[in-house]
Image: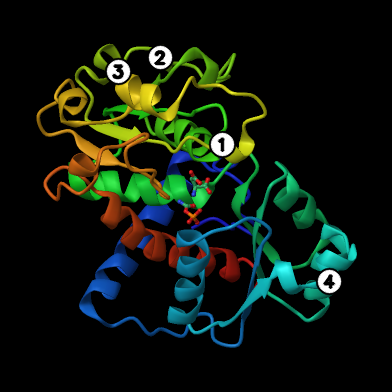
């Protein structure tokens, strides 16, 4: 695979590099399932997880991925670090870099923070979610989950529903899924959809019945209240009535349509438990499992470009 020093976004990848990452991740997914999890391709390498925003899935799976490849993994706790004494992001990163860290996994509330760090440090920088900009490993793990279940990652109709405007997951998925030749629909109230998408071929719907008609994949998103500056929905209850995914709304999609959600879920707000926990239709747990495999592939690929 071509060199990939940093992974800052799906922007910058192409269909070949995406396919190569998914193929490598698929092989790690099989190994992980077989119980043969320990490898040593990152032995002697140091990975630092630098999360300025909360995370359950992404931070844990990067840690597991790094350990399974034999890396030394350090989780920096921002809350108890010298960031609280006023140290800047760049000084913090330069300090970690001086300890000869090889891989720096960064989540930050500001869009563009990982790209800025990538210009300043010698380590490979991997974006674990920056503001409303991108969450590339989420889009890759979503693509792997879709490919495993549908046998392909092109020519599918994928409805991304809910709070699109605040979602870095939606942005990375729109870029990846359109690049691979899928039909992407965005479904949500006008207040939660961006003014312009900037990507050709993406359709907009405000009605779940229309937006889900004929969809192969229904991808739900959390209402990201922490990024809302004004009341953009009347109430959580009303939102659920019109946009929450329940059995009835899911029936508008294809009979074999699969349900996805990046997590964390707000049950009863954007998704009904009956649908989220339906093993026949929901792939939410598999998404989490694929997160480890995809992050192993990304760490491995980025580390190799550093040799
Ligand atoms: N966990 C994802 C993110 O960090 C989605 C979400 O928080 O709703 O972007
Ligand atoms: N999907 C996702 O990024 O989850 P976390 O915020 O828990 O990492």
Q: Pointer 3 and pointer 1: residues touching (CB < 8 Å)?
A: no
Q: Is residue 296 above or below residue 39?
A: above
Q: Please report whichever mark, 4 or 3, sits nearer to the chain's N-terminal start.
A: 4
Give the SS element for disc 3: helix
Distance from Cα at disc 3 to Cα at disc 1: 21 Å
Q: Please report whichever mark, 2 or 3, sits nearer to the chain's N-terminal start.
A: 2
**Which callout, 3 or 1, points to the residue nearer the camera?**
1
Distance from Cα at disc 1 to Cα at disc 4: 28 Å
What residue do we see at 82% from left, 65% from top? 83
Q: Which residue is mark 2?
A: 203
**Which callout, 2 or 1, points to the residue nearer the camera?**
1
Distance from Cα at disc 4 to Cα at disc 2: 45 Å
Classify mark 1 as within 8 Å of ligand 1 or not, answering yes or no: no
Q: Pointer 4 and pointer 3: residues touching (CB < 8 Å)?
A: no
Q: Please report whichever mark, 4 or 2, sits nearer to the chain's N-terminal start.
A: 4
Quadrant placement of the C terminus: bottom right
Q: Which residue is mark 4?
A: 82
Q: Which residue is mark 3?
A: 208
Residue 87's mark?
none
Residue 243 location in percent, x, y?
A: 34, 23
Q: Please report whichever mark, 3 or 1, sits nearer to the chain's N-terminal start.
A: 3
Give the SS element for disc 1: helix
Q: Which residue is mark 1?
A: 225
Q: Is residue 250 above or below residue 6?
A: above
């Amino acid at each position: 695979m071509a060199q990939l020093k940093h992974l800052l976004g799906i922007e910058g990848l192409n269909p070949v590099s995406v396919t190569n990452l998914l193929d490598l991740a698929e092989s790690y997914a099989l190994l992980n399932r077989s119980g043969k999890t320990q490898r040593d391709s990152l032995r002697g390498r140091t990975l630092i997880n630098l999360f300025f925003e909360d995370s359950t899935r992404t931070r844990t799976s990067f840690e597991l991925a790094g350990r399974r490849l034999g890396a030394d993994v350090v989780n920096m706790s921002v809350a108890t670090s010298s960031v609280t004494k006023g140290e800047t992001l760049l000084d913090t990163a330069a300090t970690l870099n001086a300890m000869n860290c090889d891989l720096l996994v960064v989540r930050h509330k500001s869009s563009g923070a990982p790209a800025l760090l990538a210009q300043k440090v010698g380590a490979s920088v991997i974006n674990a979610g920056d503001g409303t900009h991108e969450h590339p490993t989420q889009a890759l793990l979503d693509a792997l989950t879709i490919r495993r279940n549908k046998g392909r990652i092109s020519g599918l109709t994928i409805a991304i529903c809910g709070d699109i405007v605040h979602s870095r997951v939606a942005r990375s998925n729109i870029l990846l899924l359109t690049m691979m030749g899928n039909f992407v629909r965005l479904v949500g109230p006008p207040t939660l959809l961006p003014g312009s998408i900037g990507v050709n071929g993406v359709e907009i719907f405000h009605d779940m019945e229309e937006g889900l008609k004929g969809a192969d994949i229904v991808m739900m998103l959390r209402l990201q209240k922490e990024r809302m500056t004004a009341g953009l929905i009347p109430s959580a209850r009303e939102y659920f009535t019109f946009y929450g995914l329940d059995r009835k709304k899911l029936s508008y999609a294809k009979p074999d349509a699969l349900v996805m959600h990046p997590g964390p879920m707000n049950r009863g707000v954007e998704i009904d438990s009956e649908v989220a926990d339906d093993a026949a239709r929901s792939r939410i747990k598999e998404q989490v499992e694929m997160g480890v495999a995809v992050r192993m592939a990304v760490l491995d690929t980025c580390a190799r470009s550093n040799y």
